[in-house]
Amino acid sequence: MSGSAPNPHATADQVEAAWEDTKLAQVLYHDWEAQTYDEKWSISFDERCIDYARDRFVAVAGEAGWPYGRSLEIGAGTGFFTLNLMLAGVIEKGTVTDISPGMVEVAQRNAEGLGFALEGEAADAESLPYDDDSFDLVIGHAVIHHIPDVEKAFREMLRVLRPGGRIVICGEPTRRGDFVARRLSRLTWWATTNATRLGPLRGWSRPAEELDESSRAAALEAVVDLHTFEPSALERTVLRAGGVNVRTATEELTASWFGWPVRTFEAAVPEDRLGAGWRMFAYKTWLRLSALDKAVSPVVPKGLYYNVSVTATKP
Ligand SMILES: C[S@@+](CC[C@H](N)C(=O)[O-])C[C@H]1O[C@@H](n2cnc3c(N)ncnc32)[C@H](O)[C@@H]1O
């Protein structure tokens, strides 16, 4: 897979084959998504995303050991986690991998824009093209729910990590959190696309072909999203793979009930309808709700939160 070229425009035959082959689906879906990914997920490399990436990392792994010398990211996408953690001073030297060559290309372009040298190559997290004991840190964000054999991926992460090195995987969906978030998103999509068909709100409707494309993408999402996680079961998986000092943290309860509908609403209406004021309102509200979720965490069961992160070290 290393070195293969991005394929942003899959043929009908390839898409057909992807329904039966989850890894082909990952490559096609994410190669297609790569060019517009940062816009879709409001990814940037500034204070907002630096704080977000650093806070996620700290919530599960604390601040000891900073800065990590050599870091490897699996499923790095456009470089959101590695680049923002480099900007935050958590990582010195970053290497990114992703099963989608298109994503690696965009991550390296983003790094160039920030003046960073970023090594990267297309690689499957279940078989990493690096020697044993090569890195001080292995990270991932919103990736292991796409990997068929999660335990095998953790064994690979531990293999390429030096003894004493740390794994930090953040932003994975919990079983119950995902159940609620998906239903809220579907309801928002239905309500928005129906409401914007009506007379006074017509100007808020996106062109039919764009909505069709989003619906097709959403259908393929069902093929690429493979898992949700129960925090305690995830801890056991990492222990079986050979990790020690394993711990999980969960975040976002009311923040996810707000955040997922907002993201769905943003995808259902034309971008120029929503100005900077809306984005700031959405972000500030999300921050307030996240703070509330943190405050009530001692009395709310871990598995109800939307996001789970896990950390472990190599013996
Ligand atoms: C939801 S995106 C997250 C991207 C990025 N980490 C972020 O947070 O913005 C998941 C990424 O995992 C990648 N991926 C899926 N399966 C993979 C695998 N088996 N090995 C490596 N990367 C994989 C996809 O290509 C995609 O870029």
Image (cartoon, rainbow, N blue to C red):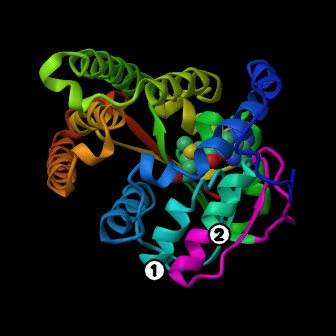
Q: Is residue 69 above or below residue 36?
A: below
Determine which quarter of the picture holds residue 304: top left
In the rendering, at what x and y percent does residue 41 appear?
A: 42, 48
Task: Please name which of the two marks, 2 or 1, marks the residue nearer to the observer.
Answer: 2
Q: Residue at x 40, y 19 (%)?
A: 179
| Residue 312 drawn in magenta | no
Outermost residue toward the bottom in this view: 115
Instruction: Please tell me how many numbered marks the rendered image carries.
Output: 2
Secondary structure under badge 1?
loop
Q: Quadrant of the C terminus?
A: bottom right
Determine which quarter of the picture holds residue 183: top left
> What label does residue 78 carry, if any?
none
Whether residue 166 sits left or right of residue 181 in the image: it is: right
| Depth check, front residue: 122 or 207 | 207
In the rendering, at what x and y percent does residue 226 appear?
A: 62, 26
| Depth check, front residue: 110 or 171 | 110
Q: Residue at x 17, y 25 (%)?
A: 201
Region of the chain picked out in magenta, as a range: 109-134
Whether residue 233 sits left or right of residue 208 in the image: it is: right
Assign the magenta stretch its main secondary structure.
loop
> What label does residue 89 carry, if any?
1
Amino acid at dot 1: Gly
Crowd rating for badge 1 (residues with CA inside 10 Å; few <14, some 14–19, many 20+): some
| Residue 131 drawn in magenta | yes
Whether residue 175 sits left or right of residue 148 in the image: it is: left
In the rendering, at what x and y percent does residue 217 appear?
A: 56, 28
Q: In terms of sequence position, does the residue under pointer 2 or pointer 1 come before the other?
A: 1
Disc 2 residue lies near ligand 1 with CB under 8 A: no
Q: Residue at x 38, y 53 (%)?
A: 42
| Depth check, front residue: 154 or 117 | 117
**What residue would you read off at disc 2?**
108
Q: Is residue 196 above or below residue 234?
A: above
